[in-house]
Amino acid sequence: MQYRTALIGCGRISGKHIEAYIGNSAAMDFRAACDVIPERAGERIGLYRKSGRDTEIPSYTDYKKMLDEVSPEIVTIATESGYHSEIAKECLRRGCHVIVEKPMALSTSDAKDMIAAAKKSGKMLAVCFQNRFNNTVRRVAEAVRGGRLGNILHGSVQVRWNRNNEYYRQAGWRGTWNLDGGALMNQCTHGIDLLQWLMGSPVRRVHGVIRRFQRPIEAEDFGGALLEFDNGAVGMIEGTVNSYPKNLSESLSLFGENGTVVIGGLAVNKIETWRLADSANVGDTEDKVLLDNEADPPTVYGFGHTPLFRDFTDSLDNGAEPLVTGEGGYPALEIILAIYRSMKEGRPVDLPSDFDTLSMKGIFNG
Ligand SMILES: NC(=O)c1ccc[n+]([C@@H]2O[C@H](COP(=O)([O-])OP(=O)(O)OC[C@H]3O[C@@H](n4cnc5c(N)ncnc54)[C@H](O)[C@@H]3O)[C@@H](O)[C@H]2O)c1
């Protein structure tokens, strides 16, 4: 089936949404774009038309007017993070299915409200954790779900990227507590999602430390945490935007009873270690798996938006759940907010825990 689709928020990441509409044009019929800065919506429509589609696509500066006039069936939201919740709830209330960028919200209560709004309207809500669709990640997820690593004892995620002062100067909302959060909430959120998703047990307790070492922002430019899972396993998180002088890597390591797996590369796009006790039996020796690796993507955003959007429309067609539902996007947010809370209160935080980025205002002021 083809769904009338509209875009809200036409900045940096929205190019990936356009790419995903083009890649899924049999299912997504791009009908309108909205940005409070009109040229930006025009640019995104231009990008779409460059792919050979010459239909007229209107642009809007008021998303509610767009919803009234275009009646989209799917809305994809790529505004600043602090606006996700309000806009998503309005779209759901009006009967649209919603794909929202990560992080889904900046407070647990807003995220819960979004999930409740989707339930109430009977519409689908998904969160853009597109790295779950990387070939490498799928391969590891398959091995984990198939029990090939045995029980996972500990897992670790390292996001060692560079976001320089210029990056923060380009858009005033970045690194603020009311619209963004810092290295953990913005950059590390994908890795934290993968860690909690693959470990196969809910997080019980969070010990966190954050710092604002050098970037000109309100929130953290470094975050470290230790996670205790319900089943006794342990998770470690290291997230920084201070890697000099450019992005270094994003990696995820899983240490199971019967296997060690490391995905690395620029953005969890390369299997670097694949040592599973049963490898020889199933013919996927370490050498073979490493040879299958893909090159680094041109940006850390990778190629996951197109399969994520496809999974969403396939799920609508089949009455199934998408891979990353609202409920599926929630744990990463809850964990990051618990790390913040742990820093603020100077103690470990037990989950479930309700918190929000606004409560962190002033944390580094003395
Ligand atoms: N999935 C990923 O890998 C990934 C990568 C980068 C950014 N993101 C997320 O995407 C979101 C956007 O990030 P960005 O870097 O593209 O930001 P950006 O500042 O480049 O773009 C945001 C756009 O939203 C517009 N906007 C704000 N309020 C609006 C409203 N009410 N109606 C319509 N438009 C509105 C702004 O004018 C701006 O053009 C953030 O939540 C960010 O965390 C996700």
Image (spheres, grey):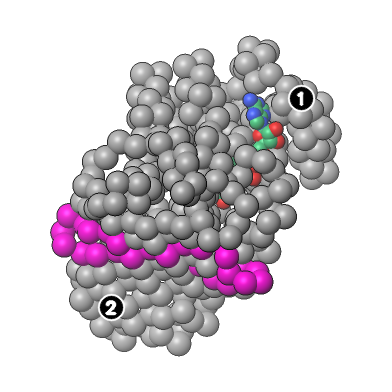
Give the mark, 2 or 1, whose residue is nearer the N terminus: 1
Residue type of the residue flagged with mark 1: Ser
Whether residue 132 is visible here, answered yes or no, is no
**Residue 172, image x and y in percent?**
67, 41
Image position of 199 with respect to 40: above or below:
below
Q: Nearer the viewer, residue 136 or 357?
A: 357
* Residue that mark 2 sits on: 259
Q: Nearer the viewer, residue 124 or 218?
A: 218
The magenta stretch spans which residues? 226-250
Say what secondary structure mark 2 lies in.
strand
Pointer 1 local density, CA inside 10 Å: few below 14, some 14–19, many at least 20: many
Measuring 49% from the left and 72% from the top, which residue is drawn there? 264
Image position of 219 with respect to 208: above or below:
above
Ligand 1 within 8 Å of the CB at mark 1: no
Picture quadrant of residue 114: top left
* Residue that mark 1 sits on: 59
Does residue 131 appear left or right of residue 345 in this picture? right
Whether residue 341 is visible here, answered yes or no, is yes
Measuring 53% from the left and 67% from the top, which residue is drawn there? 160
Q: Nearer the viewer, residue 219 or 147?
A: 219
> In which quadrant of the rendered image does the N terminus lie?
top right
Residue type of the residue flagged with mark 2: Gly
Q: Are marks 2 and 1 in contact (CB under 8 Å)?
A: no
